[in-house]
Amino acid sequence: MLKSAFVLIQRDLRLALRHGMDSLMAVVFFVLAVVLFPFGVGPEPDMLTRIAPGVIWVAALLASMLALERLFQTDYEDGSLELLSLAPVPMEAVVLAKVIAHWLTTGLPLIAAAPLLAIFLNMEERGFLALIGALALGTPLLSLIGAVGAALILGSRRGGVLLSLLVLPLFIPVLIFGVAAVDAAAFGFAVRPHLLMLGGLLLGALVLTPWAAAAALRQAVE
């Protein structure tokens, strides 16, 4: 099963690299969204320092959603999803493989770009490690939650709008604890409780979301 899941990850990574616009658009959107904030709120360093964690996290959250709609859509349209449902590999493993590929092509580049944008927003240096740690825990969580929404909207019209309505409320706890971790580090408070909460949410999502997304995919292919 692990070998089959690894093959699926390789396949999705090759497809993402071949049609790399979705991943590139996510990173470009992330950068542009953060860069635009100083033009809207003003260039005062103190103001930017205060809002930097929230701006980066909101931009990362929205950027991660850009490629979610097509997480299963392409396989659904070309019939690959039906073949995968008939394969000996559990559908839960298929969901996890596609989530890992989505995170590698979307979440990981966002983490890499975040420190540079934090410097641009004059964020406290003490918050850099907390920002990277929180994003490392939070972005996989966003991908896992988004996979459930992406599976539920298969075959529906205006899927992008519906996906946003489904997953954005579920993203709020990730946003709260992610921003709180960075703020705590910047002001010299304990970061560990917030990271532990993100880790707990991630473990819970690893257990629950593949099962939920797999059930939705089976319903879509029937």
Image (tube, rainbow, N blue to C red):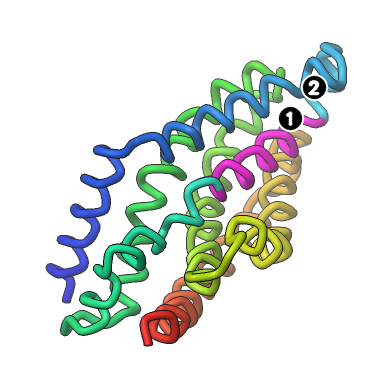
Mark 2 and mark 1: Cα distance apart in space: 6 Å
- SS at mark 2 in the image: helix
Image quarter of the N terminus: bottom left
Image quarter of the C terminus: bottom left
Magenta stretch: give its range: 51-65
Q: Of 111 and 95, which appears nearest the observer? A: 95
> Is residue 217 in view?
yes
Question: Which residue position is annotated with label 1?
Answer: 52
**Horizontal side, residue 90 vs residue 140: left or right:** left
**Horizontal side, residue 2 vs residue 155: left or right:** left
Q: Is residue 64 magenta?
A: yes
Residue 53 percent coordinates (x, y): 71, 36
Identify which amino acid the numbered label 2 is placed on: Leu
Q: Is residue 81 magenta?
A: no
Q: Of 213 and 201, which appears nearest the observer? A: 213
**Horizontal side, residue 131 vs residue 94: left or right:** right
The image quarter containing residue 72 is bottom left
Above or below residue 39? Residue 150 is below
Q: Which mark is residue 48?
A: 2
Q: Which secondary structure type mostly characterizes the magenta part of the structure? A: helix
Residue 110 percent coordinates (x, y): 49, 36
Mark 1 neighbour class, 10 Å CA radius: few under 14, some 14 to 19, many 20 or more: many
Identify which amino acid the numbered label 1 is placed on: Ala
- SS at mark 1 in the image: helix
